[in-house]
Amino acid sequence: MKSSALLLGLVGLASAVSATTTHKSTRRDHDTNDYYVLHLDADTSPDQVALRLGLVHDGQLGELKGHHVFSSAKQGEDIVKRELTAYRRRRRSLGTVAERSTLDGVLFAQKQALRNPWEKRVIPPKPESHQSIVPKAEIQPALVAKQKQIADALSISDPIFKDQWHLFNNMYAGHDVNVTDVWMQGITGQNTTVAIVDDGLDMYSDDLKANYYAQGSFDFNDRGPEPRPRLSDDKHGTRCAGEISAVRNDVCGVGVAYDSKIAGLRILSKAISDADEAVALNYDFEHNLIYSCSWGPPDDGRSMDAPGIIIRRAMLNAVQKGRQGLGSIYVFASGNGAAAEDNCNFDGYTNSIYSITVGAIDLQGQHPYYSEKCSASLVVTYSSGGGEAIHTTDVGTNACYSGHGGTSAAAPLAAGIFALALQVRPDLTWRDMQYLVMNTAVPINTDIEGEWQKTFIGKQYSHTFAYGKVDSYALVEAAKTWVNVKPQAWFYSPWVHVHQPIPQGDVGLAVELEITEDMLDEVNFERIEHVTVTMNVEHTRRGDISVDLFSPEGIVSHLSATRKMDNARAGYDDWTFMSVVHWGEFGVGKWKLVVKDTIVNEHQGNLTDFHLKLWGESIDAKKATLLPMPKDTDDDDHDITKTTTLQASTTTFSSSTTPTQPSVVTSKPADHPDRPVKPTQGTTTLSTSASSSTPASPTASSDPGSKTEHETSPSASNTNTSWLPAFLANMSTKKQIWVYGALGSIVAFCLGLGVYLYMARRKRLRNDPRDNYEFELLDEEEGEALNGRGGQGEKGMAGIRKGRRKATRGRELYDAFAEGSDDDDDDDEHTERTGHGHEGVRRFSLSLDEDDEEADSYNGADASHQKTYHDRSDEHLAASGTPAAATAAAPAAVATTTNAAATPAAAPAAAPSTAGVRRGVADEDELHVIGDDSDEEDSDEEDSDSDEDKPSAARHGDSARLL
């Protein structure tokens, strides 16, 4: 009995182990199989989905809960997409009566395809301007003596420790990571693990094997448990690993955290799928605390690549759930393409808010020719340059290397330093680590004119040197007493639609967006850590474009720079730039985006739209929630029909509320800019009036296919020379065709209605026994009323109204396109205009003969440019006197805006959306054709209808005068 129970227990344990290691044991054969990743809801069984689609369930996709890998025999098409499309088409045809199917639980599906691996950050050849031979630095005897003293105190006998200048510089005092005093405290990386995501590592090297962590390692290229180098150039990962965890022994040198553990995740040696890369970036994230990544898109000055949706989900999953919810720490090399004018903001890994992006400096603290700069770079540290390189471990039992360098060497060095901080404070979150890095970085080369700018919180920032170089001692000491920051919050602005050409040369196209304190309070947002700008630019040569972002505090982020090698005609397509320059700002005020086309040539472009996202610390930790998983459709909301809030092309505003076209900035922003006070043509000020949703959940739109985001469009020029109306000139050709088609349909309808009324009147007149009269006869009572007899003032008019035909129900309706009939010369039309900058409402009243069931009344208005303006804060508008622009809900946005003070001299404006409200009978000034005595027969109905008209008269005082 006991043996049976034991056997069952072993079987259960084996099953559990098998279930948790499916991704390890399953081999991928892309030559004979197709692979799919499906995201299923919690109520859907992957086995049922596999049965329904004819697939094999290969297991969960690593640590991504709800994401599963399926396989099938290789076919020429995406069979999952085919089946899902067919099913959803059938379900729509059946309507809501259809019962739930297994396929209803499929939230996302993607067929996997092999792609080339990302490139290792190897050092590129020196450009001609850097070909001069740098003399070898002289060793300082006093520094050598101090280095030996440290080695003796720490029992370091590694033969190349004396050459590891990045740990202790015996040539240039102080130009190292300042780690030896940390070691003296016994802080050497115990109980921490760094995963090297690279081309593998040599776990059999005598310098690494004692610190190798096998459980956190895997080979995703050759599908095996050991990420051992297999190709001749599989050396990059081993060299990076030696910088971090080279053991203190008699082989080579030591790592900066020489008692830390090291894991290897091999992904760079062969073609790989997004699914496998996603698993690698989540691999054993309870024990792999830091992921060191010295790779990315090509550093050629022309590439522009970002991780796919599955990889982005994996990274978010890691920062939310890794390390028991504290968050995995990603460290990325900034890139080695500076000589090709590459910029790390064109790399979707280095400009991720989840990454600590690390640049390089040489042994004298100077900027090497290869290290890319950008506004997403957080810190720099030492690497090759100035005649020296990093001395580290190489592939082989006892092999060393003295030529390691590039930002590939800077990133793992920083990762090892972060491991030291985690030893003393294992409770640091991924954002705490970023705060500590930023706060303790040491500015260098501050004497370079124009290189550094002072930030809002008093720090110094350089796009070349970031916040400065990593100081191990300062970082660890600060970590000891660090108070954890509150959870993350975020704010999304609406899409700002521009659709304006970018001027060439030194001028720039500037657009402003205002964010208020109330908007940030609504989303529980306290202060900024990261700022991202997602934008669309159409241009025939992408490398000509540069983008700057100015904060309300006057701090500038150079989001994008020109690239001489980038000849792509693609422009920017929903590309997201990131900045850490505005760390600590509150975000309240006007943000300005300046887009330039600095190269004067035949290539031109337009700024289409953009939106701003602020990421930072929450106000109330109890209200914070986790960011939802990203979707491929997250940035599709700007393609929906927009609700514009500013239309200067159709309405002229008073000077205090004039939104003008995006300004032309003639001065080139510097790192210490004075924000332009008087741009050449003003700036478009968009004051957002409703913000993103709180971190809890997005707000659903009435349109299930769109988000509740009202978008903001900067105004067009008032000097538009196009023959088209300005609002049409800014539209696409398809939209113009639609508008003209709609107008044509309306004109045809009005003509048809006029013909119908004309024929009806002709028929009535032919049947009228009194049609020989030129005028209709008046009752004696009615005649007296018109002549002032039978009642004066109101009473006289009341007599006329009583004798008039009953009021029509049609008078209570609004038709923005109604026109008076030209066929009835006996009828008179009266046009009344009201003020407040809106074109007066034309009102036509047509009274027919007694044979009609009702008289027809039409309310007309020129509403071709009708817009409704709202604002959630009247007090804000009253105080500012400026039109407000809307902000968005997260991840969607809801926004409407009020034009506060349109003048009577304005160009024709739209009628308000309260168009259904008409003037009351008592206020109408209309000439009516009076009927004959037969009208008396309808007196009861007239009294009833006149009662129905009374509420309209009452409403007139409230809303009609707002027209």
Image: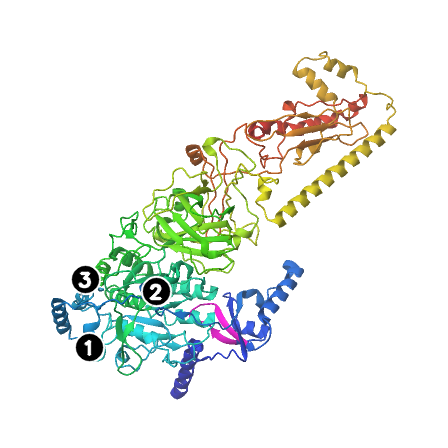
Q: Pick whichever, 422 or 51, lies toward us.
A: 422
Would residue 378 appear left or right of 41 to someone viewing this image?
left
Write down the quadrant of residue 189 in the picture: bottom left
Please say whether residue 30 is one of the residues in the magenta stretch.
no
Q: Amino acid at mark 2?
A: Glu
Disc on res. 505 = none
Tell me the residue at 26%/57% (across/down).
441
First in sequence: mark 2 or mark 3? 2
As helix, strand or loop, the secondary structure at mark 3 comes to loop
Picture layout, residue 750 above or below residue 100: above
Would residue 621 appear left or right of 638 to someone viewing this image?
left
Discs 1, 3 touching: Cβ within 8 Å: no
Disc on res. 174 = 3
First in sequence: mark 2 or mark 1? 2
Q: Residues within 10 Å of mark 3 (few under 14, many from 20)?
A: some
Q: Amino acid at mark 3?
A: Gly
Q: Name the residue carrying label 1.
A: 158
Image coordinates for residue 279, horizontal then vertical, percent:
42, 71
Q: Amino acid at mark 1?
A: Asp
Q: Pick whichever, 876 or 397, lies toward us.
A: 397
The rendered magenta stretch, by its main secondary structure, is classed as strand
Q: Which residues are magenta?
A: 57-71
Between the residue at mark 2 and the residue at mark 3, the CA separation in whole angstroms equals: 30 Å
Tell me the residue at 45%/53% (across/down).
545
Image coordinates for residue 910, horizontal then vertical, percent:
58, 35
Q: Nearer the viewer, mark 1 or mark 3?
A: 3
Q: Name the residue carrying label 2.
A: 128
Q: Which image quarter holds the N terminus?
A: bottom left
Between the residue at mark 2 and the residue at mark 1, the CA separation in whole angstroms equals: 37 Å
